[in-house]
Amino acid sequence: MKKVKLIIAAVSVLSLVSSSAVYADGFAPGEGLYIGGFGGHGSGIVQPKVTTQDLAAGPDDFGVTTGEMTDGGLGLSGAVGGGWVGYGYKMGPLYIGFEWDFASGGEKFKATCTGSCTIYDGDSGTKALNEVQAEVKFTTSGGGRIGYYLNSNTLLALRGGIAASKFDVKTNTDSSNYYGGGPAFAASLQSTLAEIDPNLSLRLEYLVVDYMTANVSGWGDTANTRPSHDNDEITGQLYQARLGLAYSFFDVNSLF
C-alpha cells in the first residue's frame, strides 16, 4: 500500500512540474509571431457632397447647385469576418509590435427614391435614378501597436496606422467599384486561454477608419462642352467590433 501511495504522489508531482513547464513556455498575449481569426459587426456613415454646374447658357454663364449632407449620413451595417497577422515584443509590463489585418466586408446600405430623381450622363443624357446601393467588399489595415499588460495573461493595446477599403456601388443604371482609405485606429483587450493552450488567446477589438474626403469619378459628365457636369465627393467613417482568437507560435529570440 505504501508503494502505491508513493507512486501516486510521484505521478502527481510530475504532473504539476510538467504543467508548470508548459505554462512557463507559453507566450503572453500578442507576444511573438501570431495569427488569428475574427468575426463581428461593421457599421459606418457616408456623407456625400454633389456640386453640379449647368452650362446650358454658355461657359461664362452657368448656375451652380450644391447638395451636401452635413448632419447624419447614409448608414452602413453588416457582418464582417477576417484575420490578423503580426509580431509583438513583451518588455516587462509594456508591449510594442506591428500588425496587418484583412476583413471581408458585409456593411451595406440601400437608398430608394420614390419621387422624380434623375442623374445626367454625358453619353446618353438624363437617366432616371431611383435606387442606389453600396457595399464594403473588404477592408485592410496595418500599423504599429503599443500596450500594457494588466497582468501576465491580459494585454490592453492600441494600434494606429492606415486602412484601405473597396466599395461596390450600384444604381438601377450603373455599377462601379471605388477605393477609399485613410487613418485607422484600434483598441483591443486580449487574454490568454491558459486552460486550453498557453499560446492561445481571446481578443476583443474595436476598429475605426476615417476616409477623410475622396473624389468620386464616373458619375455625370465632367466635360465643359456638355450641358452640365458634376463634382462629387464623399466623406465618412467605418467602425468594426471584432471578437476572435489569436495564436502565438514563434519568437525570433529563439534563433539566437
Image (cartoon, rainbow, N blue to C red):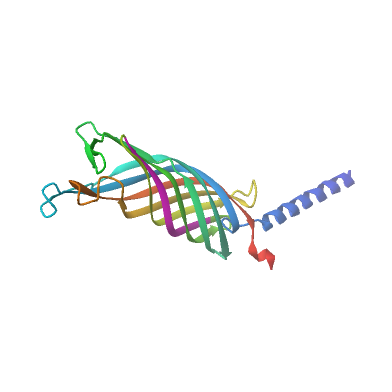
Residue at 42% x, 47% y is: 240
| Residue 134 horizontal side relative to residue 241, left or right | left
Where is residue 221 shown, x and y percent of the image?
A: 25, 47
| Residue 190 horizontal side relative to residue 69, left or right | right
Residues 25 and 122: in front is 122
Which residues fall within the magenta stretch?
Answer: 155-171
Residues 77 and 148: in front is 77
Residues 135 and 98: in front is 135
| Residue 74 horizontal side relative to residue 200, left or right | left
> Quick one: which residue is furthest to the top in this view?
114
Which SS type dominates the magenta stretch? Answer: strand
| Residue 93 horizontal side relative to residue 252, left or right | left
Query: Which quarter of the figure is the C terminus placed in?
Result: bottom right
Where is residue 16 shown, x and y percent of the image?
A: 74, 52
Residue at 19% x, 33% y is: 116
Query: Which quarter of the figure is the N terminus placed in?
Result: top right
Where is residue 143 shown, x and y percent of the image?
A: 47, 60
239 drawn magenta: no
161 drawn magenta: yes
Q: Give the number of callouts.
A: 0
Residues 62 and 30: in front is 62
Where is residue 81 shown, x and y percent of the image?
A: 49, 43
> Quick one: which residue is furthest to the bottom in this view?
256
Residue at 67% x, 54% y is: 23
